[in-house]
Amino acid sequence: MKLGCSTYSFWHFKGKKEPLVKYLEKIYIYNFDGAEILEDHFENTTNSYILKIKRYAFSLGLDIFAISIHNDFVNPSERARKNEVEKVKKWLEIAYKLGAKAIRINSGRWRTIESFDELMKQKGVEPPIPGYTDEDALRWVTESIQEILPVAEEYGVVLALENHWGITRNAENIIRIIKYINSDWLRVLMDIGNFTENIYQQLEEIAPYTVMVHAKTYIGGGEWYTLSLDYDKIFSMIRRYGFQGWVSLEYEGKRDYDIGVKISKELLSKYVY
């Protein structure tokens, strides 16, 4: 396994953002092997900027192994879903230019609960839009991914579907999507902190399909909730399924970012070797 760090670890959707190069420098300073870049941290997506970031990461000896994007296929509007499909295709091209091996994608959610803070209080559970069901959402997600898949194959970039909020908040739906599409270019990004019930059972269910791991830590207590995770159990489990890929730190605690990342690096280094 290799231990990387997401730029999310230094910014939790609040407060001022630093230039992307500053986050890359921090990841280098804390001696991670590589960087996962959150979509929000790109100042723009021009070709010259993307190549500048690629060159700078190379100068630091950092591997940009993944990009984490925000997309949402759970929408009754065919036009809206098409726009999301085109967005993912655009980021696949950016990932290819950067040399990233994967992009994190989401299924999306109903957004019948507008506030993310409130959604977290409800453990990610929200009702469908009236007149629709989760089966409709699953169909929209699979159809959208199928449209994107040829582009992922062309660029050689894996679509890493995260067990995130919305339709993929449980292992059953993730596995249904993976098995239905049945492609090596669609795999699972296991986030060890995104299942809030039957945690270890659900992590084990998605482990056979996992291509990358988000390792959550909650130094100082979590931004939205705190899980007492058994890292011994989790890492023993993914090893049992032959996982040898990238583990990306997602520090989500309330302590100062630099302190939280430093402590998290020391913690995860015991398991990633």
Image (tube, rainbow, N blue to C red):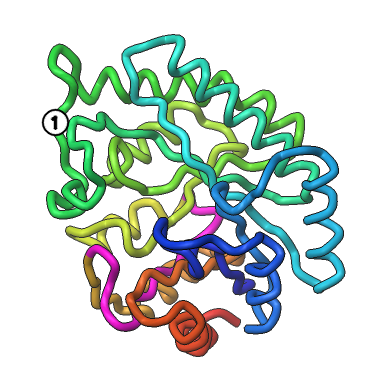
Task: Decide: is 88 above or below 168.
Answer: above
Q: Is residue 34 left or right of residue 202?
A: right
Q: Which residues are magenta?
A: 209-224
**Residue placed furthest toward the front:** 16
Q: Quadrant of residue 78?
A: top left
Residue 209: give x, y in percent of width and height.
Answer: 48, 49
Q: Quadrant of residue 246?
A: bottom right
Question: Does the magenta portion include 220?
Answer: yes
Relative to the observer, which residue lies in front, 189 or 180? Answer: 189
Q: The N terminus is located in which quarter?
A: bottom right
- In what element is the residue under mark 1? loop
Residue visible at 77% across and 49% down? 98
Residue 67: give x, y in percent of width and height.
Answer: 61, 50
User: What's the amino acid at mark 1?
Assistant: Pro
Residue located beneath label 1 in the image: 127
Residue visible at 14% across and 54% down? 121
Relative to the observer, which residue lies in front, 244 or 48? Answer: 48
Q: Is residue 143 left or right of residue 122?
A: right
